[in-house]
Image (tube, coloured by chain):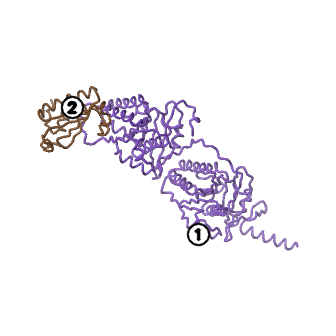
Chain colours: A purple, B brown
Amino acid sequence: MNSQAHPSAMKKIFSGIEGFDDITCGGLPLGRTTLLMGGAGSGKTVLSLQILVSAAENHGTRGIFVAFEENARRIAANGKIFGWDIPSLEKEQLYFVDACVRSDVVRSGTFDLTGLLMALEAKARQMGAKVIVFDAIDVLLSLLDDPAAECRELYRLNEWLTLHQFTGILTTKVEDGQPAISARYGFMPFMADCAVLLNQRIADRVASRTMRVLKYRGSPHVLNEVPFVIGPQGIEVGSSNGVHPEPQPFNEKISTGVERLDAMLNGGIYRGTNALITGSSGGGKSSLAAAFIAAACQRDERALFISFDENSRDIVRDVAMLNIDLAPYLDSGLLRMESVRTESASSEDHFMRIKSMINEQHPRCVVIDPLSALARVGGALAARAVAERLIYLCRNKGITVLFTSLLEGSDPHLETTTLHVSTISDSWIQISYALLDGERNRAVSIIKSRGSKHSNQMRELIFSETGITLADPYTAGGEVLMGTLRQEKETAATLEKAGAL
Amino acid sequence: MTEARHTTDHPNGAYIFKLYIAGGAPNSVRAFANLYAICRKHFPDSHRIEVIDIMKEPIRALEETVLATPTVIKLFPLPEIRIIGDLSEENAVLGALGLPQKEKT
């Protein structure tokens, strides 16, 4: 995203965090004060450090990090976890001030921050620093032990930052729960030009993080709460606002791995789009997905198969019975199969893992089986946002992706998916059970196929040792015949034909 | 920290203080006056006060992690003690130095 996208006069400093720059419409206000608020462990320190490191690494902007709560050396060392080379940045671009408030300090009478600000001013001038982080400013203020003095010193700090045109980032703890901002520091957001609230919530015993821009003086910003994770490269914000260039559509159609299904889809599914396979448990969704991935590997395309809660080796064994042999592709590395435990993480964490798998494997075709597993923990709403972002991620990379999703409920005609992803999927193939004359047969139908003609027939899906295929449609009296009825009818027809000859 | 004044860590047994001030700020001026008065009264012949003006030596304050002004550091006798503020609450200072506190009136 470039600055032209936002015709705001305000100059900004990129955070270097894609989603964060999206929700703030270009980053933090240059030469102004930004407040990052959140509970313990909500990611305030990491976010402020990441912005500082990114400014130094990508734009040569120098900065000072003042640590009031944690040991500055430890904070700098933590940066190594995220792959930030802080020791080499410390030579010129970054300076850490260990301002841990010592527990044995004695207070007697009034004091203020004048000395600290004088010292920082001199240091900033000496090294040419433009960004200053005050991490855990609340710890410093609590030392004053007087609300009026806390307010006064905070304003002193803000005035000092403004006077010297430093870009200030203050982080402060706020109480968990509502109201989000404690009365004590309630005035803080009014003082700052930009205020961001970080949250950590537990839903279904799984933690998820969100952030929200509370205010941004003189600039548009995203009002919604957006999810974020602290991943191996630091903070990643999942912005749903991103205006990304639409990728060039492909005109090529690729096979689903089942010849007759391709025919129903008028040649397969478009490359770079996504297809959804829905069905009830045991319907054969995973097998169809395996057929799709095998077809990709046969075309010599790299592929990724992510299954939730099912061992990849079991899948390989099971589909081998259907004449789908994935083993050689796994051995050659053309195919990567990953089995993920649903309960292990929030949907947001799953997204980040899938994203990094995609970045490592560079697949052209991806299967996620089942996508509905995402909704099992952390709530359907978050899972839906993640599903959408997965779809956009793949679309932007030109990856053809096939999702499976469990259809819940006893009514097979109630065509709803748990995540409501059917609305954003390009193709939708449904496997249902047709109950007729005491038989349960698998039937496949195509509910939609964007930009392409498709068959509206319901066809019997046949799994056998020779592979997956669809039976010829057999209708009698306006009904599709399946299973034994179809076989009888077929035999009868053949006999009739023979008799006629 | 109470028995520290009997230490022989320092050859002269003198009390050595560092006082960090921010130029001529009123609380800095008060801190110096208060510290000087306490020293005169309790250690008339054995004290030394080094005044560091952060305005003149700013980087030194960062290196010694002096956050607030005024700040007093008692270097000797050990242990080192930090007191922040203008030292107007005399009993807090006396307590920190292990001296008998004044009766409240």
| Residue A75 seen from this side | yes
Residue bearing mark 1: A317
Amino acid type at image mark 2: Glu
Whether pointer 1 and pointer 2 mark residues with C-beta atoms closer than 8 Å, the reply is no
Along the viewing direction, whichever of B62 and A481 lies nearer the viewer: B62
Badge 2 crowding class, 10 Å Cα cut-off, few under 14, some 14 to 19, many 20 or more, is: some
Along the viewing direction, whichever of A176 and A26 lies nearer the viewer: A26
Asked if residue A447 lies left or right of residue A389, the reply is: right
Label 1 resides on the chain identified as: A
Along the viewing direction, whichever of A185 and A77 lies nearer the viewer: A77
Which label belongs to residue B89?
2
Residue B75: x %, y % from top left: 20, 40
Badge 1 crowding class, 10 Å Cα cut-off, few under 14, some 14 to 19, many 20 or more, is: some
- The residue depicted at 27 percent of the width and 42 percent of the height is A103
Q: Quadrant of residue A140?
A: top left
The correct choice, above or below, for A73 with respect to A336 in the image is above
Residue A428: x %, y % from top left: 67, 54
Q: Quadrant of residue B2?
A: top left
Quarter of the image with the N terminus of chain A in it: top right
Residue A375: x %, y % from top left: 54, 53
Quarter of the image with the C terminus of chain A in it: bottom right
Amino acid type at image mark 1: Arg
- The residue depicted at 30 percent of the width and 39 percent of the height is B65
- The residue depicted at 73 percent of the width and 51 percent of the height is A452
Asked if residue A449 lies left or right of residue A161, the reply is: right
Under circle 2, the secondary element is loop
Separation of disc 1 and disc 2 at Cα?
80 Å
| Residue A434 seen from this side | no
Residue B105: x %, y % from top left: 15, 29
Which label belongs to residue A173?
none
Identity of the residue furthest to the right in this view: A501
Label 2 resides on the chain identified as: B
